[in-house]
Amino acid sequence: MIGIIDYGMGNIHSVQKALQSMGAETVVTNRPSDIVTYEKIVLPGVGAFDDAVLELEKRALVKAIKDAVGNNKIFLGICLGMQLLFPESEEARDTKGLNLIKGAVRKFAVKKGFKVPHMGWNQLNVRNRKCPILKGVPDKSYVYFCHSYYPAVLEKEIIAATCDYITDFTSLLWKENIYGVQFHPEKSQGVGLKILRNFVEL
């Protein structure tokens, strides 16, 4: 069973529909007591870092997520859900994230010829072929992005794929039972569905 966390800011139904299309059993929940009971957990996210943390705290979900990860539940953060894995973000300097991954979330610098937010299709540069959710995903595959901030990862060994837009940033990370994707796999057509299928089959 895959639990999709609903804290009022995620692209819940698109993610659920994509997972169900490959036969996965899913449930949408905002109950902390439920989260630790699922085999896998998905934290989607669209919006602002500080608002997301506030909503997670309001629902007592921060501790539940940390407990689930600590109990080796397989976790996938999508877009803002990935950024929330970090201790801090330049989007909200006084707000603390989940602090499950070392690093910080940075804002894209202004650069001539580039628009922010980074919106649309861009390539994955695969760095770690051993990453389970990248199985069968070719290098330079296109996926769909929509973000103004990016994860700056300190632990270089957990960077599974990057993307080059203004700067070379981590687009997919893997640390033990934690996965994070800065792009939207549910909007990335065949490649995104392959990544989600790999997650389902873990």
Image (cartoon, helix red, strand yellow):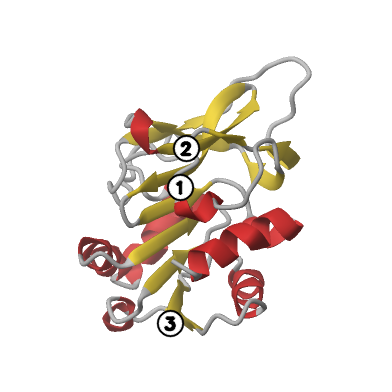
Question: Furthest-top residue in view?
Answer: 112
Secondary structure at numbered mark 3: loop
Rendering coords of residue 128 (x, y %): 47, 37
Question: Which residue is identified by label 1?
Answer: 131
Question: Which residue is identified by label 3?
Answer: 1
Residue located 41% across and 69% down the image: 41
The amino acid beneath tag 2 is Asn
- For disc 3, the neighbor class at 10 Å (few under 14, some 14 to 19, many from 20) is few
Secondary structure at numbered mark 1: loop
Question: Which residue is identified by label 2?
Answer: 128
Q: Nearer the viewer, mark 2 or mark 3?
A: 2
Rendering coords of residue 28 (x, y %): 49, 81
The amino acid beneath tag 1 is Cys
Residue 200, disc: none
Secondary structure at numbered mark 2: loop
The amino acid beneath tag 3 is Met
> Which quadrant: the N terminus?
bottom left
Residue located 37% across and 49% down the image: 85
Residue 132, relative to residue 25: is it above or below? above
